Amino acid sequence: MSKKLETAALTGLMVMILFTPLVLGVDTAQAASIYDWQSLLESTSGETTTEKLLVGIANANLGQLAEAFEVFSSFSRQEQGPIGEFMESQSKVLEDSPDDLVALNVLAYGAYVTGNTARSIALLEQIIARDPENVWPRNFVALLYGRQGDFPTGMTHLRQALKIEPGNQYTHLLLAWGYKEQKQMVSALYHYLRSPDAIKELKRHDVF
């Protein structure tokens, strides 16, 4: 990029930043999910391994990503067995009710916790198809795509998430990451500056 074009791009970036409203604070409101994740969170103690997984899933669907990652990273090797059994039971639920959103989430995030990223992505795609207005599965699957190096696919979900919830700082932060990895630095900087609180939240958990 020539110096003149770079200056023009940066000028345009500053204009966008100045005239685009910034939502201060990380918005963790439920984004039009078809399931009431707040009620699940409030009714689940988290005392057992399976309940702890459900708490993390509810956190993830409510946009409480720092809390979700704290839960997901807390499982011990000994808890892998109960998680696997829980996933098996939810697979049977899906045989009778293929659209059961809780069962799909248990399988998707259970796969993530047990290290099966490809399986987690495939299930999150099914969740997005059934719960399309909830931005949080889109953000999470974009993160997983990014970790596998598939930024274009992940960013397709992020652009759609931004249409649903333009002020979502996590979406902006993930877009900043994707643009940075693709050497589109002006776009990366724009989205990075739209996500100050999300940066602080996720940095504590080494998400990137």
Image (cartoon, rainbow, N blue to C red):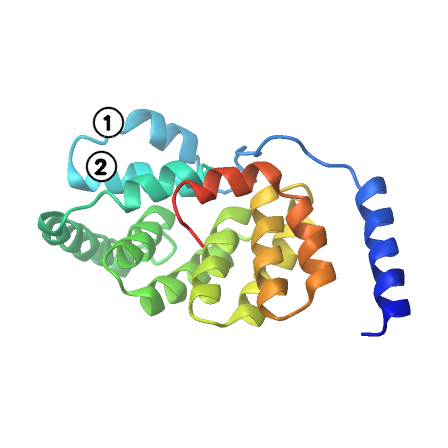
Q: Mark 1 points at which residue?
A: 45
Left or right of 153? Residue 18 is right
Q: Nearer the viewer, residue 92 or 207?
A: 207
Q: What element carries label 1?
A: loop
Give the residue displayed 42% in from the left and 30% down from the top: 38
Give the residue displayed 51% in from the left and 42% down from the top: 33
**Disc 1 to disc 2, how far (Cα)?**
7 Å
Instruction: Tell me, for residue 203, which label it has, or none.
Output: none
Three-letter code, disc 1: Ser
Q: For the view shown, which residue lies furthest in the front direction?
A: 3
Left or right of 147? Residue 134 is right
| Percent x, y of residue 198 | 54, 40
| Percent x, y of residue 172 | 63, 50
Q: Nearer the viewer, residue 86 or 184?
A: 184
What is the crowding at mark 2: few (fewer than 14 residues within 10 Å), some, or many (at least 20)? some
Above or below residue 2? Residue 100 is: above
Q: Do the residues labelled 1 and 2 touch (CB within 8 Å)?
A: yes
